[in-house]
């Protein structure tokens, strides 16, 4: 019986510890990439990704909430860019997790591509 309650306690604490990670995202969107834009201006939403016109994050501006972005100065930019381009070329479904960093849009922080 003691083992039963220990397992439940561990499960409960693990679930509670993971809650802040899920609530930290300002937006989570999934779908097929329908458009990719690149802008040749530093730190001006250099890579923009659209998922069929669906809302990607919670932003007051309705236009800005329809695309997620990366800047070339972001960590792991090249790998994320490649991942998104391959998903676009192959028509794969992606899941994009974004943060509204300082109120400037849907900044990509995590991307998952599924087969």
Image (cartoon, rainbow, N blue to C red):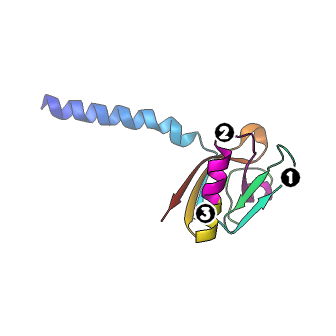
Q: Helix, strand or loop at disc 3? A: helix
**Mark 1 neighbour class, 10 Å CA radius: few under 14, some 14 to 19, many 20 or more:** few
Numbered tag placed on residue 86 in the rendering? 3
Is residue 87 depicted above or below 1 in this figure?
Answer: below
Q: Give the quarter of the image for residue 93.
A: bottom right
For image coordinates 45% across by 37% down, the residue present is 18
Instruction: State the extent of the magenta-drawn residues as a range.
Output: 62-84
Q: Is residue 8 left or right of residue 92?
A: left
Q: Is residue 27 visible?
A: no
Question: Does dot 2 land on a helix, a strand or a loop?
Answer: loop
Give the distance between the C-alpha atoms of the residues marked 1 and 3, in whole angstroms: 21 Å
Q: Position of residue 79 (x, y in %)?
A: 62, 49
Nearer to me, 63 or 111: 111
Task: Give residue 75's mark.
Answer: 2
> Label 1: which residue?
40
Q: Quadrant of residue 89?
A: bottom right
Indicate which disc, 2 or 3, sits on the residue closer to the N terminus.
2
């Amino acid at each position: 019986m003691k083992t039963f309650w220990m397992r439940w306690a561990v499960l409960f604490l693990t679930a509670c510890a993971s809650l802040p990670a899920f609530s930290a995202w300002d937006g989570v969107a999934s779908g097929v990439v329908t458009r990719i834009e690149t802008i040749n201006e530093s730190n001006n939403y250099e890579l923009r990704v659209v998922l069929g016109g669906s809302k990607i994050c919670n932003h007051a501006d309705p236009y800005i909430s329809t695309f997620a972005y990366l800047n070339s100065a972001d960590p792991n930019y090249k790998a994320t860019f490649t991942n998104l381009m391959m998903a676009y070329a192959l028509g794969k479904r992606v899941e994009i997790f974004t943060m509204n960093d300082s109120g400037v849009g849907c900044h990509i922080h995590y991307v998952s591509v599924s087969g």
